[in-house]
Image: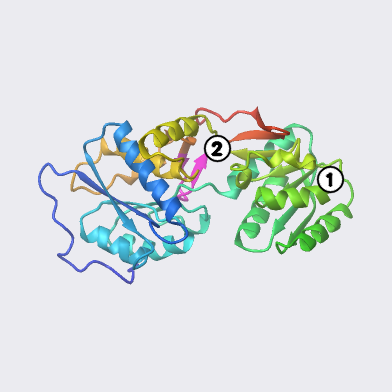
Amino acid sequence: QARGPYPPPPGEIAPIEAGAKQRVALIVPLSGEDGGIGTSITNAARLALLDTNNQSIQLTTYDSTQAGAAAAAAQAIREGNGLILGPLFAEEVRAVAPVAESAHIPVIAFSNDESVAGNGVYILGFTPRQSIGRVVTFASSRGAKRYGALVPNGIYGERAAQAFKAWVPQVGGSIGSIETYNRTAANVRTAANALNAKGKLDAVLIGDSSRVAAQAGAAVKPGSRLLGTELWANDHGIGTTPRMRGAWYAAAPDARFNQLVTRYRARYGKVPYRLGSLGYDSVLLTVRASRSWAAGRPFPQRLLTEKEGFVGVDGIFRFGRDGVAERSLEVREVTATGTTIVSPAATSFP
């Protein structure tokens, strides 16, 4: 049995009283440079409890930036929480995982790093594998056969490249080249020029933020359809760069999130970070599970991997046996004034 650096000593977990609520811990950054994101997640999570009029869950927030996420998890477990929502970053999830596992407490984290999932850890974040698979499949349906990619050096770029290499053959395509770069304008242009030298490509994936994608896209020779990842989803001005118009990328549908923004603004007086939806959806999931979760009993993990999945602000999702959230994404096309949906997200799983 794996044990973490802060396992709660025997007898120090808070006892559960008869008729008590299910105790759920939310571990997010509430201070420091990421405090705004953590605050959005927290407020959205609380809003989910209000919207569902749930009286059976006691949600307690713990700051991962004070003594660290592992210490926060240990405190949450000592105080009797039977489920952990969060933390946000992969390194924090790695620190929390053994602490939670030693107490048999499941973790629904907000990370997008698939390597931290498993052994009682489920990740709710948006992963490049999902968005790349969706947009490559769509491009194939529109006739793309030969693909190239531009990805940054680093962990995200490595994951994007792996996903790209896995998906292109699955749709019957071939890969002309994958070029990497450091995030400098000169490096981006050099990588794009190297890709241009590989011959005609039907589609080119740029696995980076919309800002870098605009630089890279401008350097990719005309004739290739540009493809993007979920990182483009928050930039509605990407079409101000002419070369980006007509590009496709996959993202979670925005319709329900826009409704959440309206309610969030009415209650808190500001607009939430886009990742706030993860807090809302994790609580919706918990509320649904609470119908089968008696206070003082272990959280019913089997519910997380049920085939029909869950409906949330970000559309439908369900967890695979690997602990990674499978999502239904839409494909958007970049226009001069924003984006248009060219392939809607599915509303149910097959």
Task: State the residue in front, 108 or 322.
Answer: 108
Q: What stretch is highlighted in magenta?
A: 318-328
Who's the residue at 34% across and 38% down the image?
Answer: 47
Left/right placement of residue 190 relative to residue 317 reads right
Q: How crowded is mark 1: few (under 14 residues within 10 Å), some or many (20 or more)?
A: many
**Circle 2: element type:** loop
Task: Say which element carries label 1.
Answer: loop
Q: Is residue 172 visible?
A: no
Check the image and name the residue furthest to the bottom. 5
Q: Residue 252 carries which label?
A: 2
Q: Where is residue 341 shown, x and y percent of the image?
A: 64, 29
At horizontal 45% and vertical 42% (from top left) the residue drawn is 272
Residue 122 lies left or right of residue 159; in this view the side is left
Is 346 situated left or right of 301 in this image?
A: right
Coloring basis for residues: rainbow
> In the rendered image, which quarter contains the N terminus?
bottom left
Q: Name the residue under label 1.
A: 201
**Residue 89 seen in the figure:** yes
